[in-house]
Amino acid sequence: VAPLRLDEYDEVDALLAVHTMPFMSFEENNLQRLQVLCASYLDFSQLELTVEDVRSAWVQAPIGLQQEWAQLSELGQKFRLLSYCAVWSGQGRVSDDALAEFAGLQPVESSTWTLKGRGGKPALVVLLPLLSSAGLANYRRDMVTLLGQILGRSNQRPDQSFDLDFLEVAGAPGFRELHRLLSSAQPDRPPASQVAERP
C-alpha cells in the first residue's frame, strides 16, 4: 500500500494498493488484472502531471474541479476547443433547496460544484465543455430564465440574488482568476452588469 498524493493537511486522498498472495501464480487471468492495475496507475500519473500547474494556482480547490479544469485546458491548448466556466455568485438569501434545484437543471454535459463564494455566500461553479460563443449566449439566456422561475416562487429576482461571471477555461491563470473571483469582495456593479443583463 502506498500513498500517491497527500492534501494540504497531509491526509491521503489517493492510494495505491496491491495485494499479492503467496500462492498467486502468473496465470493469464492474474496477469490481466495486473495489466489493468498498471494501466490505471499510468492514467493516474499522467493526469497528475496535467493537473500540477492548475493545482498550484489553487491548492484547496476540489480535486475533481482541478482535474476537469486541467483536462479541458489541455483540449483548448492542443485543439483550440474552448470551454467556459460559469460562476453564479450569491448576493442575497438563497435557500439550499433553490440552489440545489438550479444546479440540477444545468446542462447534462456540464459539471457543477457548490462552493463558498464572496462573503461566505454560496456560489455555483459550472464547467461548460467545448462550447461556442453562440452556445454560451444560449446557456446564459436559458439559465437566467430557469433561475427566474425558481426564485419567483419566493418573490426574488435573479439580478437581485446572483451575479453571473464567465471565465474561459485556460490553465493555471484562468484557475487563479476563478479563485480570485470566489474569494474577492463583491464589486460595485451597475445594474446592467448583473445577471439579467450581462452579456
Image (tube, grey):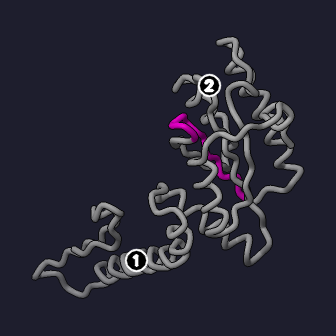
User: For the residue labelled by badge 1, is the local secondary structure a helix, a strand or a loop?
Assistant: helix
The answer to whether marks 2 and 1 mark residues whose Cβ atoms lie closer than 8 Å is: no
Residue bearing the label numbered 2 = 92
From the image, which quarter does the C terminus lie in? top right
Q: Callout 2: 10 Å neighbours few (<14), some, many (20+)?
A: few
Task: Give the magenta-colored segment's residue range.
Answer: 118-129
Instruction: Using a 10 Å C-alpha cutoff, classify the residue at mark 1 as few (fewer than 14 neighbours), some (14 to 19) or many (20 or more).
Output: some
Q: Position of residue 109 (x, y in %)?
A: 67, 50
- Splitting the image into 4 quarters, where does residue 36 fall? bottom left
Q: How many marks?
A: 2
Residue highlighted by disc 1: 41
In the rendered structure, which amino acid carries the disc numbered 1? Tyr
Amino acid found under the numbered disc labelled 2: Gly
Q: Extreme left residue here?
A: 22
Query: Quarter holding the N terminus?
Result: bottom left
Separation (CA) of disc 2 from disc 1:
45 Å
Is-magenta flag for residue 84?
no
Is 47 rendered above or below residue 11?
below
Towards the viewer: 28 or 50: 50
Front residue of 155 and 137: 155
Q: Earlier in the sequence, mark 2 or mark 1?
A: 1
Q: Position of residue 150 (x, y in %)?
A: 68, 21
Taking the spot 67% from the left edge, 12% from the top edge, the residue there is: 153
In the picture, measured across the screen, residue 102 lies left or right of residue 6, that is right
Q: Residue at x 61, y 42 (%)?
A: 185
Where disc 2 sits, the SS reads loop
